[in-house]
Image: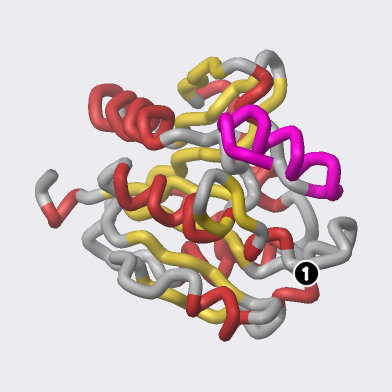
Amino acid sequence: MDRRDSVAGVVLAAGTSSRMGRNKLLVEVAGQSVLRRAVVTAVEAGLDPVVVVLGHESERARAELDGLRCEVVLNTGYQEGIHSSLRTGIAAVPERCEAAVVLLADMPLVEARMIRTLVQRHGAERPPLVVSDYEGVDAPPILYDRRLFGELRTLEGEGCGKRVVKRHSAEAVRIRWPARALTDLDRPEDIERVRAELGAAR
């Protein structure tokens, strides 16, 4: 991919995991931490650069990324919510990137091929948005064209990314994925379900 029109990855990994009771990004699934798995997936998909937004327990999280081709940015206001991490991540995307794929670190069933499909559709059609549609539910990974970066950086409050998606919904390309891939990690039972899904030993 030409470096002047590459697509960045923005991995949101700053939250406190309040419902989990421990830092879910450091939990191991299929032989690696949830955080490392997410960043490896983004790198394998060819995103360049991969920007990882850290906040809660940032030093422990940073240690999980040792040796990976990624750039860490710190969201000091992570307690404000995920929208603050989205703004921080988008602001760190270099000028050479024509778009960015936003990923949540706690979605371990997202695969590199899914991300590559979003990038390919953007390259072919140049829509402002390429959205993952999990049987009727819009969720990450979502590709935002650079044309939308200004909106993402200035919107305030929870759900700002969703508001941008809704505003440009008519122009968006949607890629359908099975609902099972939407699994995120909010509660302890989610971990066991994901481990079983990935065929990991309990």
Residue occupying the point 67% across, 14% down:
135
Quarter of the picture containing the N terminus is: top left
Choose top left, top right, bottom left or bottom right for residue 125.
top left
**Residue 145, image quadrant:** top left
Quarter that holds the C terminus: top right
The residue shown at (50%, 78%) is 62
Q: Nearer the viewer, residue 51 or 128?
A: 51
Question: Can residue 155 be seen in the rendering of this structure?
Answer: no
Residue 181 located left or right of residue 117: right
How many numbered tags mark residues here? 1
Residue at the outermost left position? 2
Residue indicated by mark 1: 16
* Residue 113 located left or right of residue 36: left
Q: Residue at x 32, y 52 (%)?
A: 43
**x, y percentage for residue 142?**
52, 39
Please report the bounds of the magenta region as a residue range. 186-202
Q: Amino acid at mark 1?
A: Thr
Q: Judge left or right: residue 98 versus residue 109.
A: left
* Magenta span contains residue 49: no
User: In this rendering, is residue 9 above or below 169?
Assistant: below
Q: Residues within 10 Å of mark 1 (few under 14, many from 20)?
A: some
